[in-house]
Image: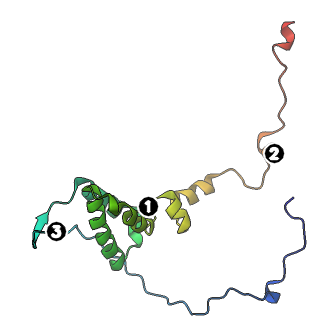
Amino acid sequence: MAGRGPQPKDPSRRARGNKDPVAQTVLRFEQAEAPELPTLQVMKDGELVEHTWPARTLDWWEMWKASPQAEHFSSTDWDFLLDTAVVHARHWSGDGAAAGELRLRVAKFGATPEDRARLRMQFAQADEADGRRPEGGRSARERRGTLHALPDPKASDS
């Protein structure tokens, strides 16, 4: 049963404080505008040839530009995402080997619910929904009243 056992040790008496031995560097955040996808060039027969972005990659890029995460992207984030767009284009052009790298790269930006949970991202709507919940701290019985069983209709048929 939860709550049983000895009290936790006083944190001041613990052998490990798990403090970071290196001080954290605090950077000034500068939001960057999303760039347009540049002209894509690929090496073909020893020379650079213009290549068309797959339609799926163009849609994917627009999705990232409009995503809530984009509000927190700096210039280096957009640069990394540009490189990721090239991987995305390779994948959607039939290069199955690009799938693993693509998955790893988009996970860094919180592409899936699991990625966002790992990165400790939460949409603001969830905070708003929590504020609309009925008064917290009340039990189900207090919120709904006492429940009573109805007589079994089959029992009265005999």
Q: Is residue 16 above or below residue 108?
A: below
- Disc 3 designates what residue? 42
Q: Quadrant of the C terminus?
A: top right
Residue drawn at x 47%, y 58% is 112
Q: Nearer the viewer, residue 17 or 63?
A: 17
Q: For the residue marked with disc 3, what is the amino acid? A: Val
Vertical relation: 119 (above or below) 137: below
Residue underneath mark 1: 111
Q: Which SS class for mark 2? A: helix
Evaluate whether residue 123 shows in this view.
no
Q: Nearer the viewer, residue 15 or 73?
A: 15
> Mark 2 or mark 3, which is nearer to you?
3
Question: Disc 1 or disc 2, which is closer to the eye?
Answer: 1
Which residue occupies 52% across, 66% down? 121
For badge 2, the amino acid type reads Glu
Q: Which residue is mark 2?
A: 142
The spot of residue 59 in percent (x, y) is 28, 55
> On the picture, is 127 further left or further right than 64?
right
Element type at mark 1? loop
Q: Is residue 132 visible?
A: yes
- Taking the view exactly as shown, the residue that stands out farthest to the top is 158
